[in-house]
Image (tube, grey):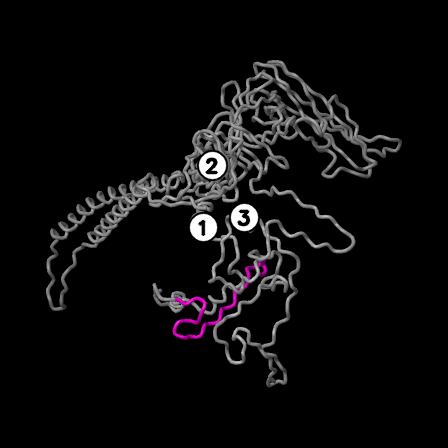
Amino acid sequence: MKAGTAVRWGSTLDSVVVYAQGALCLRLARGTVPADGRVLVTGLPRSIDPGSLRARVLGAPGVRVTEARVEVEAEPVGEGLPDELRRETERLREAYARAEARRNRQSGLIAEVAKLHPISPGRKREDPHRRTPVDAWLELADFVDERLAGLHARLAELEQAVREAEHALEVAYDREARASTDAPQAHVETTVGALLTLDGTAEGEVEVEVEYGVPGAVWVPTYRLTHRQGDGSGRLVLRASVAQRTGEDWTGVRLALATADLRRRTDLPRLRSVRIGRRQAAPAPSGWREPPAGLAELFSGFDAAGPSPASGAAAAGLPRAVGLPVAVGGAAPGGAAPRPVPPPPPSPQGFGEPVGGFPVPGAAYGAPMPAAMMPAPSQPSGPQPPGGRPAAKARTRGRAESSADGMERAEGAAPPAPVPVTGPPQPSGAELDYAALVLSGPEEPGGRRGRLFPDAAFDPVAAEHRRRAETVAALPLPGHAVRPRVSAGSFDHRFDAAARADIPSDGTWHTVTVGEIPVGLRTEYLSVPSVEPTVYATLVLSNATDQALLAGPVEVTVDDDFLLTTALPTLAPGGVRRVGLGPAEGIRVTRRTQLRESTSGLRNTTTVLDTRVHVELANALARPVTVEVRERVPVTTEPDVRIEERADWTTPQTDTGPDRHAPGTRVWRLDLPAGATAALEGGYEIRIPTGKALVGGNRRS
């Protein structure tokens, strides 16, 4: 099916779903169904994945799509934006070369002038001394100084011109590199369309939806958090940094972001039954038939005629002749004996000999076919060599020769026959795509002639477009950004943008607002004075939605003042996490410890280490705050070591709350009014046998 007679429908890009790497694009086209039902939907990018093309008819139950495939066309184009950018870059490159040449000539002139100096004439021994012309020497020195001053001034101007030309050239290079790949890159524009076959009739126009996948699109989540102190909620705006180089500009599209892998397998696994008893033959694959009988004899006349003069001249390196007579079905012109047909080349790696036009998967390299599936050999009808056998089928006889050391070696012996491949052929999906199969001609090797094979023509232009598109995966990530596939874990999520977006195909990051997510917020202050005498402000986020919040950078704004940009951890639905905001300068904390060592027991067999902890807090803020002070208590696994606590602190739960606590963590929580102070007292006793001591000494905090 060719696109020459198909009716062309223009299309509009309507929506794009960006995955972890790659995207699914959806285009809409409208038109009247022609009589033959063939329609070419134009506007597809060059980097399209041909195997991802899908099409369906919307709003017309009587019309359906029976076939869809990618069609590539080329046509010359006029001067466009890429040509202008290339011409401008070439002009600036030439200007930079001229400026550099002028600078180099000026440097060479300065070097020549600097070499000017007076040279005294040679004097013989018997010649009297001459008077030195000091005035001439001074005039030459003044001339050189004056000349060098002017040349150096001009050299400074030329160096400045070189720097300006180099800067302009770098800007042009960057502009050309960042130009959208949606425009043609050469004087020949390659257009891609979806060639559809519609079946059915409908009154008026119908709308067709074309979906296809493209590489070269990535995204990472970013956030903006707005919070007012004293308020129990906040506004968390989900944004996305999207970069794409798919070859088409996304203008006014409905954008969706997904964390799934676009290239993952989607076919269901097939569980075969295990049978005990007689072996049952595997069913033949659907859509495959045995090759027709007599296929080998179909090309006997072609083999008898020998190679055509055109192919013989091409093989000999001679110019190809046009219009020479070729005999078909008889002897070659001039009575020349036909040349034997060359043997077919070996099969590619991983496939055996073709069976009915399909390779047999799993066969070893060069393995023969089963005898039942072997095609009948073609019998040439030309003259036979002496002995009544074709030359190609002359039997090879082995003979043994004795070497100098008495060893014997066999020459011409046939190699051991490999194990034949059994079972019916198992063609792949590409081999069952009848519209993409190509009938092999008589010039093909004997195992392929007259059979259907997939058209494996390699498109280097499309491969180059896809390679360039996939370079966006190597873009450096923004600060605190995490790949969505990494932060999503074992689950996949999708986020739909609230408004349409524009993202050019330039391979750079563009920020798009996705939507607002309601989150619960509360401000807490946290201090670990045993590690650092500082109080830190934190925001405790709770996700009450049914969507996860992926890890990424978040811009925190408190009371309409930008505070900082920090990293937001992955927050599952219903999860609670803490986000640090930095030190709180308005709250001070001090800690003092006191250790007393004593003995107890009837014979003083137990050493008692009594540790007292004193913590003071002062709130200098104009509002009340909630402060959580964390302390640590020693833990032990020794049966003869006891630890007794003497404080009103609490033991946090390690499996609940926004944090994970280490064993031995103790927590004080208190509310401090504005301008108030508070003191916390705590401690613990460590009882160990007198003969033992703590590692590092007993008297330590």
Q: Alpha-carbon neighbours of circle 2 within 10 Å: few (<14), some, or many (≥20)?
A: many
Q: Is residue 188 magenta?
A: no
Q: Nearer the viewer, residue 385 or 293?
A: 293
Query: As displayed, is residue 341 above or below residue 411?
Result: above
Span colored in magenta:
326-355
Q: Nearer the viewer, residue 195 or 216?
A: 195
The quadrant where residue 330 appears: bottom left
Say which mark, if any, is on residue 243. 2
Say which mark, if any, is on residue 433. 3
The quadrant where residue 677 appears: top right
The secondary structure making up most of the magenta span is loop
What is the total number of numbered labels drawn onto the structure image?
3
Q: CA distance from mark 3 to mark 2?
A: 35 Å
Where does the image place residue 63, in percent across and percent down from the top left?
Answer: 51, 34
**Circles 2, 1 touching at the beta carbon (< 8 Å):** no
Q: Nearer the viewer, residue 30 or 697?
A: 30
Q: Name the quarter where the C terminus is drawn.
A: top right
Say which mark, if any, is on residue 378. none
Say which mark, if any, is on residue 459. 1
Where does the image place residue 360, in percent across and percent down from the top left?
Answer: 60, 57
The quadrant where residue 262 appears: top right
Q: Mark 2 vs mark 1: which is more N-terminal?
A: 2
Nearer mark to the viewer, of 3 and 2: 3
Tell me which amino acid carries mark 1: Asp
Where does the image place residue 657, in percent across and percent down from the top left?
Answer: 68, 26
| 508 sits left or right of 399 in the view | left
